[in-house]
Amino acid sequence: MNISSNFDQNISRFHEILDVQKNFDIVYHTLTIADKKACLYFIDGFTKDEILLRLMQDFASVKPDSFPSSAHDFAKQYVHYGETTVETDDKNIFTQLLSGLSCLLIDGYDRAILIDCRTYPARGVSEPEKDKVLRGSRDGFVETMIFNTALIRRRIRDVNLTVEIMQTGESSHTDIAICYMKRRVDEDLLNKIKDRIENLHVDALTMNQESLAECIFPHKWFNPFPKFRFSERPDTAAASILEGNIVILVDNSPACMILPSSVFDIIEEADDYYFPPVTGTYLRLSRMTVSFLTLFLTPVWLLFMQNQNWIPGWLEFIKLADDMYVPLIFQLLILEFAIDGLRLAAVNTPSMLTTPLSVIAGIVLGEYSVKSGWFNSETMLYMAFVTIANYSQASFEMGYALKFMRVILLILTSLLNVWGFILGTAIAVCSIVFNRTIAGKSYIYPLIPFSWPEIKKRFLRGRLPHAEKSQR
């Protein structure tokens, strides 16, 4: 329904739909502008008071003999603010008003004037807790999307950088920003993503990026390996955009979604590029090796314990030194779940109690657990390595995917011995090999399809692009 030129009718409709008598934070202010009745609507807490005060002063200077004949002319002459639009569709007006814009209705005009003088509560752009680096930028994304796009614009001062805004969610009308570089992005993938977002029929994106990811790429739920890369670092997002990737920002979320992403993209970290090529290569290869050991260390050890005649002489020390009272498979599975329980407890523990909890956990899962007979010291050692190694992986999703594959390997190895180990390894390999990115390409490119130049880039950190150009 469109705005009417009848002021009283518009006010009655706005009051009824917005229910201003019950919603204390929806504020309306009636005023007179050059003998014309007017009303200003805004959301308390979303509006800059100093801007509204300046606008009121400007309205007081309007003379009856120079009153504009249209809302567009009035906004042009008397609303001295950069972000001003004129709208007639009340559905769009209500959406913009509830997003934080101020709405001005004037008697005789069949259009509303929307003034974007909003400000959102936001924390500082400090370094994110999860994506820390040893060297490099110390800023990070926040929950306010406009701040996040500004952090990217600060790093890419190019007219080809495009930031498109979209909305989805019948109730939430969540803002989504799609960032990409013209002439570098995959146009087919870009159009596919935009079409999927436009055709979403959801009530709200309650879980931000995760809700959006599951809507635009409803992949098979039983494959745990992540299809998207998430980052809270604007430098990582900017680098991905320059490489031709698409970055999606969702309002109210302090992380961006990078796509398409292969397994090698997800394993990468910013530290790989903040150090010289040799150091960056070492860090990358170390992370890959640790991830491999995270998956296979405990299953291989369990396989050797079930077939001790296979252990060569130089590995005799891996055998159990003490008597075993609980089967190894149960020891390993109990520790797998106990460690996750401790991790969840640490997340929900107040910071002042974190140290006491760590001490108690160290005692319970340390010497006392071994002395009680529940666990052998070798089991505790290998599971401690696996737990620490999981934190070398920046992606939580990848860490849990490796954990699920490890548990499957352990169970199959305990049941079927060597054939179970082979079957579990095949399941893990197939879960990766037959996975696909959102673009429909191989999850393990450049291994499949094979590309030697790209393999060298993935495993060996070469010179940065700007350094190569400077030598030419």
Image (spheres, grey):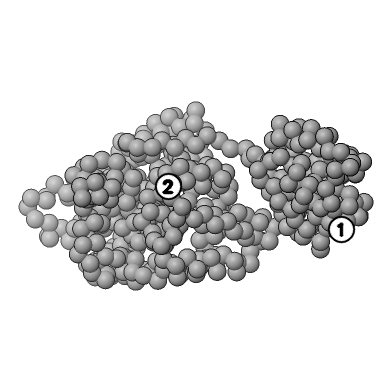
Front residue (pair 9, 231): 9
**Residue 348 location, x and y as percent?**
52, 40
Q: Residue at x 84, y 51 (%)?
A: 69
In this rendering, the answer to whether 360 lies above or below 279 is above
- The residue under label 1 is 4
* Residue 440 placement (x, y as % from top left): 40, 71
Residue labelled with disc 2: 156
- Contact between marks 1 and 2 (CB within 8 A): the answer is no
Percent of width and height locating residue 178: 51, 57
| 369 relative to 93 in the view: left or right | left
Between 71 and 460, which is closer to the camera in this rendering?
A: 71
122 versus 281 height, above or below:
above
Q: Position of residue 381 (x, y in %)?
A: 26, 43
Residue 385's quadrant in the figure?
top left
Q: Nearer the viewer, residue 51 or 376?
A: 51
Which label belongs to residue 296? Answer: none
| Element type where label 2 sits in the image | loop
Which quadrant of the figure contains the N terminus?
bottom right
* Residue in view at x 23 percent, y 69 percent: 450
Q: Residue at x 69, y 47 (%)?
A: 84
Q: How many marks?
A: 2
